[in-house]
Image: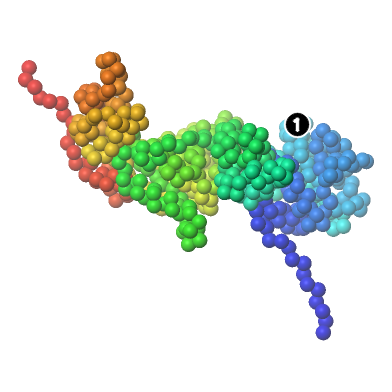
Amino acid sequence: MIATRAKPTRAVPTTRSQQVAADISALLRARNPLLWVVTREEARVEQHLVETAASAGYAAYTWDAAQGPRTAAGEELRGVGSNDPADMLSAIAARSATGAERAIWIMRDLAPWLRDMPGAVPLRMLRNLARSLPGTPRERAQAIIVLSAAGELPPELSTCATVIEWPLPDRAEIAEILDASVEALPEDSRSSALPKPARDAAIDATVGLSGEEAQACYAKSLVLSRKIVPATVAAEKKRVIARERVLEWHDPIPAGLDAVGGLENLKAWLTARAAAYSPRARAYGLPAPRGALLVGISGCGKSLTAKAVATAWGVPLLRLDLGALKSKFVGESEGNLRRALRVIEAIGRCVVWLDEVEKALQGATSGSADGGVSADALGAVLSWMQERVGESFVIATANDVEALPPEFLRKGRFDEVWWVDLPNEAERAAILIAALRNYNRGDAGVNHIKVAAACDRFTGAEIAAIVPDAMFAAFADGGREITTLDLMNAADNVAPLADTAAEKIDRLRKWAKGRARFAGRSAENNGDREPRRGRKIDI
């Protein structure tokens, strides 16, 4: 009986970085000569690349414009090239021809040297190497890995370079960084620095950051409190995301869905979806909710709901402003959007708020002269919404649904499309109570029903606005508490949007019937009210 040698088993990649590293290992074994890795985390990515090179049978060397060629351990590599990129590329070509060891060259600063006229020679040398290296005998194979913070490579390299976007660290990698931060402390301080119940919260607080940023957040918390405080880490994370300028971090309103008056159908639906994030729901196989599109009359609570649901679910609120991502430089707008979407995917559980989305996408449907930037943004957002696998929940709001492209409304982009109409009388009373509470006037002796009746055909924003108007009047009258009469007098001075834009609102209501769910319990009847009319008097 002939014994057969067992094939070596490879460890199954568990993190996103390990999956990308396994892909690079396969590309190296397939003799791909030029890889363009998009990342801003040199240290973390280089560690993975050195391990990958070893698994594929390559030695690993680095090069930068300041130090020249170095070993993976950082030692100077004498007699091989210099800090000049053309000289270094010539040395790599010579090593592939003279029978030196198999090696990958991690080029940190090569990308800037390939631009404009000064980069013509290094660019041509790199293209020549990309043509010749695949045919080099196996024992002296060479490969070049260019590290770049931007994904835009010279068009001359588009057919010979493989572009790889390195992902941000996932939860497993963040956990390793957290454990390493705690292990660096004196042994007697480790248990108090990270109590076991706070570990998951500390990991959640930094998901979406780079490895170095996460490490810095943990270090700051240790310096300030001598322990990992998730709230301190989350505050630092807010500053880091604000620095990126591709997403806006919003503080959710403290009262949560209680701050939203009316919209009972929508609030009940959102409350039910919160259970999908529980461990029990994951074990059951319940899919994470994808999002909701809120369309309707301006000032009726769409944006307020987006801020409130983040509080109710206990997750971060990120505003994605598609208009702010646009840039005058070619390709930068698309790059900003891709970076924002990558951060959202890395953060995982969060609420993404697209406010007045019809204005941001207007150029994609009306033939805007922006060089196709709006159309590209629409395509990228639609693809991401359809294919994303993260736990982010998208709330998009629109005042004019007729301006949205039809493909944006297709089932699968959102779980549900909601119509937000003018509040009925009960909802107006609830909105008034919430507004009074917001201005610390919750105990004021106000007849909510009477004021709600006087605010017929008001939007939620118009109802909330009469509270400070009444407070000004009461303060001018000796600083007394506001009364029902103060609120009714303030309401008399309001010209409701429902009267000034009646034709547009009627048109939107007709669209909503059969196409959207009603956010309020009695919203179906809101269109049957008579317009507000002034009193007819004899003069």
Nearer to us in this view, 268 or 248: 268
According to the picture, the residue beneath numbered tag 1 turns out to be 117
Residue 428 at x, y = what percent?
Answer: 26, 36
Is residue 117 visible to us here? yes
Is residue 168 visible to us here? no
Q: How many marks?
A: 1
Residue at 23%, 25% in the rendered image: 483
- The quarter of the rendered structure image containing the N terminus is bottom right
Nearer to us in this view, 508 or 12: 12
Q: How is the image coloured?
A: rainbow
Q: Is residue 27 left or right of residue 492?
A: right
Q: Is residue 100 left or right of residue 9?
A: right
Residue at 35%, 46% in the rendered image: 267
- The quarter of the rendered structure image containing the C terminus is top left
Residue at 12%, 25% in the rendered image: 535
Identify the amino acid type marked 1.
Met
Find the residue positioned furthest to the bottom.
1
Q: Quadrant of residue 228?
A: top right
Q: Is residue 483 left or right of residue 188?
A: left
Secondary structure at numbered mark 1: helix
Residue 232 at x, y = what percent?
Answer: 58, 36
Residue at 55%, 38% in the rendered image: 231
